Amino acid sequence: MKAEEIQKLQAFFRKTFGNQDIEIRARPRKDDSAELYIRDEFLGVIFRDDEDEDLSWSFQMAVLEVDLEDL
């Protein structure tokens, strides 16, 4: 993804979730996706879909069972 696109996505996620610690980072060797972090914690991947006439993005986040144990 281009830097401008990453900045727009970052602003969207920060506003949507009310968290200025969200950072979107480009992925090495990948131009169709970026990674979402809160501070230094990796949360998931944002995929760019431009195969159809409508451009969209999807966010994929995995939750491990071990992450739920302390709740």
Image (cartoon, grey):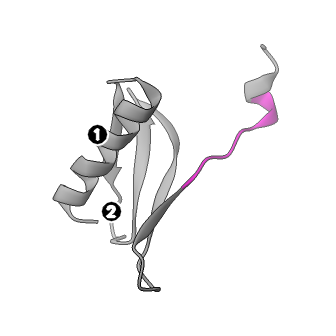
51 or 30, which is in the foreground? 51
The quadrant of the picture occupied by the C terminus is: top right
Q: Which residue is mark 1?
A: 11
Q: Is 63 positioned to the left or the right of 31 in the image? A: right
39 or 49, which is in the foreground? 49
The quadrant of the picture occupied by the N terminus is: bottom left
Q: Which residue is mark 2?
A: 28
Q: Which mark is residue 23?
A: none
Sort mark 1 into few (<14), some (14-19) or many (20+) by Cα contacts within 10 Å: some
| Sequence-earlier tag: 2 or 1 | 1
Image location of residue 42, percent across then percent down: 49, 38
Image location of residue 54, percent across then percent down: 42, 77
Specify the amino acid type for callout 2: Pro
User: Which span of residues is magenta-colored?
Assistant: 59-66
Point 36% across, 32% down: residue? 14
For residue 70, what is the image quadrant? top right
